[in-house]
Amino acid sequence: MYLDVHAHFADEGYDVVAERRKIVEAGVKRIILAGDTVPHSASHCETARVCPEIYFAAGVHPSETAGFGERSLRAIEAMAREEKCVAIGEIGLDYHYPDTDKAAQQRAFSLQLELAHRLRLPVQIHSRDCAEDMLAMLTERKELLTGGFLMHCYSHSEEMMDSFAALGAYFSFGGVITFRNAKKAVACAAHCPPDRLLTETDSPYLSPFRGEKNTPANIPVILSRLAQIRGEGEETLKERIWNNAFALFGRLR
Ligand SMILES: [Zn+2]
């Protein structure tokens, strides 16, 4: 059975009923929807309540941290007490754009790491163009990582991967590994420790089919490419990834 540990459904124009049918028919049996804002996390929470195979993570994305404070934290905490909330996320750092308020991002990231630790939940981490700061922050605050953590759509180097793995990281790979010029992501997908490997789509973004809106139904394509990259059998890999997800996300059923 396949699973997608990171996708977005809120505000993305999906017909959830039709989409679900397509996903289940493709053999994708668990989907974790990741929050990027409080309202989107709440929307995912509602979807998870009515769809047995859908779970969610509640959190605020680094690019959405303007105005992040007590109110946001309380809202995330309330959602995190739902039984189908499997993680706090996606949280982290994103220095991609030149006008980034790094201090605001670091503060929101810290506060959400503290919340995850207090609730004994894993976190889903978004980390782009910030490898040094991310590693420094996680190293400095490693006592907060006891619930485990996922580096979603991993985009740093293989060397960095070893450092994150030493802190307990899991890594998920998606459509990017199917792109022709994705040398770095492919090298990391090959390098990832077998017991830390996961699959995601980051739907609606990063479809393996350029120009199309992504869907968790594309997980089989991603897993097949991952098996090819790693020189492993698809069935073995599929089963291991399933077990890895259950090892990290203790609330998955
Ligand atoms: Zn995402």
Image (cartoon, rainbow, N blue to C red):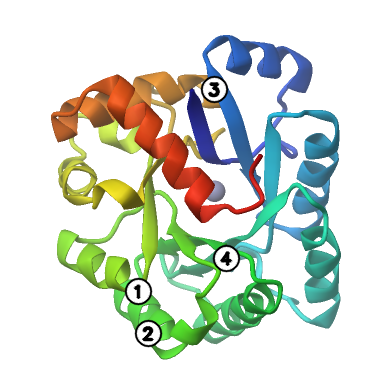
Q: Percent x, y for residue 204?
A: 56, 33
Which is nearer the N-term, disc 1 or disc 4?
4
Residue nearest the observer in this picture, 248 or 173: 248
In the rendered image, which quarter is residue 117 located in? bottom right
Label ID, residue 167? 1
**Residue that carries the numbered disc 2 in the rendered image:** 139
Marks 1/4: CA–CA distance: 17 Å
- Crowding at dot 3, Cα within 10 Å, few <14 / some 14-19 / many 20+, comes out as many
User: For the residue marked with disc 2, what is the amino acid?
Assistant: Thr
Marks 2/4: CA–CA distance: 16 Å
Image side of residue 104 versus residue 82, left or right: left
Marks 2/3: CA–CA distance: 34 Å
Which is nearer the N-term, disc 2 or disc 3?
3
Q: Percent x, y for residue 234?
A: 28, 22
Helix, strand or loop at label 1? It is loop
**Residue that carries the numbered disc 3 in the rendered image:** 28
- Can you say whether 138 is above or below 41 in the image? below
Image side of residue 208 versus residue 28, left or right: left
**Residue that carries the numbered disc 4 in the rendered image:** 91
User: For the residue marked with disc 3, what is the amino acid?
Assistant: Val
